[in-house]
Image (cartoon, rainbow, N blue to C red):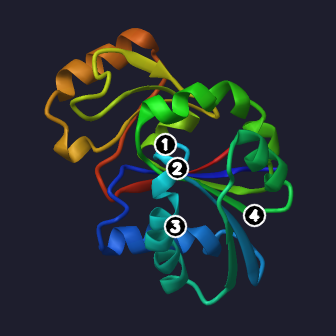
Amino acid sequence: MNINLILHGGATSTNSPENDKFFEMFTSLVEKNEVKILMCYFSRKKDRWDDLLARDTPKVLKNTKKKVEFYVPENPQDLLEKLDEYDVLYVAGGKAELIEPLYSDLEALKIKLQGKVYLGSSMGAFMVSSNYVLSFDGQDTLNAHKGLGLLPINCLVHWDIEKNKEEKVEMIKSTSDIPLLTLDEGESVRFIV
């Protein structure tokens, strides 16, 4: 079975036609009238998860006529257990230092995502890529980071506002010669693997 992977360049909170298309894919790629979606906010502090869910769920519902059920997993074990009964996994952007330590607990994701839809924005796009360089000041922007490698690509997001493009491209190329994907904020791309 295939996995639909949709990577987003960040800034999903912005109202735009591009983001509407992204949120539409939460349900349009599922061939059911009732869709179950895991909303993962591991890259954000836990006290923000309810606010993020309240921000994101109306964007999904605005772009579908299907019945939708949402669930926020508490930790990687909860996510992997629930994924068997859910159709879609969304991983929101945020801080690398919050989600990267969880990667080892999420290694089964490629198997668990078979026949499912994965949507990842910013840090969520990084997570399923092979390698990436973080985007913002205050983060480790001087080193390439390893993702889970569900997609054999190097990834750079928030590209339209990136100030150090040449340095980041050189850094990621020195890590690996696999293809490089750059995504502007609001931009998304779909892969089927």
Image position, residue 158 (x, y; %): 28, 44
Task: Tell me the element at label 4.
Answer: loop
Image position, residue 66 (x, y; %): 67, 86
- Give the residue at the far left of this rendering: 163
Drawn side of residue 27 relative to residue 187, left or right: right
Disc 4 from disc 2: Cα separation: 23 Å
> Callout 2, which amino acid?
Lys
Of circles 3 and 2, the one toward us is 2
Q: What mark, if any, has residue 46 been given in the picture?
A: 2
Of circles 4 and 2, the one toward us is 2
- Residue on which disc 1 sits: 43
Task: Tell me the element at label 1.
Answer: loop
Task: Tell me the element at label 2.
Answer: helix
Drawn side of residue 117 relative to residue 83, left or right: left
Q: Nearer the viewer, residue 120 or 39?
A: 39
Of mark 3 and mark 2, the one earlier in the sequence is: 2
- Give the residue at the far top of this rendering: 174
Question: Mark 1, residues whose alpha carbon is within 10 Å: few (<14), some, or many (≥20)?
Answer: many
- Residue on which disc 3 sits: 53
Disc 4 from disc 3: Cα separation: 17 Å
- Give the residue at the far front of this rendering: 47
Of mark 4 and mark 3, the one earlier in the sequence is: 3
Q: Is residue 142 above or below residue 47?
A: above
